[in-house]
Amino acid sequence: MALFITFEGGEGTGKSLQAGALYRKLSQLAISALLTHEPGGTPFGQKIGRWLKWAQDIDISPLTELLLFNASRSQLVTEVIQPSLKNGKIVTCDRYADSTTAYQSYGRGLDLEMVRAINNAATQGLKSDLTVLLDMTAENGLARKSPGKQDRFEQENIAFHQRVREGYLKIAASDPERWLVIDAAQSKERIAQIIWQRVSQLLSSQGG
């Protein structure tokens, strides 16, 4: 009953909250599940993730970002995601390759086909069975973030975040069977219901 479910969206849209809620729901039903995240999910990936998000006074180029995110991703796929899927687990991942397409291609302006090719190499072609996009305006998403220190991406101007959102919507529109787009302005309870409805359908189709 292996399934791979990813959560995507801009800053402040509630990805981590909903990924965690789905994992807890599955666990309560005694369904074997794993919750992981990007960048990170492995000791190697955690180190890269901290550097990518919190490096100070270092000019990290868009191409370097792309390669570092995918180095972390390659390790996560090999060490965590693929073994878990082979063991029949439902893997829930907070961000995955679509984040890199949205942020580094649409946001930073890197060539789309290059980004997709590098993503594909890092993931070894592994795609999600379902990707949940929690969508809201960039302004409202950023306004939800807790006050305090901002990471490198949260510090970007509003135009960057708007491009990321537009990128996500374009990616989702190109593959509607894989994507579930949800208005993230709804209550967290209502969003969780919508997600569970789709996940339940996937489980039923697999005899779960």
Image (cartoon, rainbow, N blue to C red):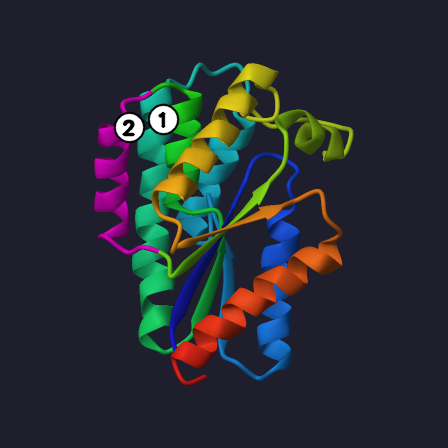
The residue lying toward the viewer, choosing from 54 and 83, is 83
Q: Are marks 1 and 2 in contact (CB under 8 Å)?
A: yes
- Of mark 1 and mark 2, the one earlier in the sequence is 1
Three-letter code, disc 1 = Ser
x, y percentage for residue 52? 47, 31
* Residue 11: image location, x then y, percent: 61, 34
Tag 1 residue = 105
Q: At x 47% / y 16%, what residue is drawn?
A: 58
Bounds of the magenta segment: 110-127
Measure the C-alpha gap from mark 1 to mark 2.
Answer: 5 Å
Q: In this view, does 145 lie above or below 90?
A: above
Q: For residue 10, which quarter of the picture? A: top right
Question: Around disc 1, counting alpha carbons within 10 Å, would you say few (fewer than 14), some (14 to 19), or many (20 or more)?
Answer: many
Q: Where is residue 4 in the image (x, y as percent from the top left)?
A: 40, 63
Which amino acid does the dot numbered 2 rest on?
Leu
SS at badge 2: helix
Q: Is residue 114 covered in magenta?
A: yes
Is 32 rendered above or below residue 133? below
Query: Taking 100 as reference, is 37 above or below it?
Result: below
Q: Name the residue under label 2.
A: 112
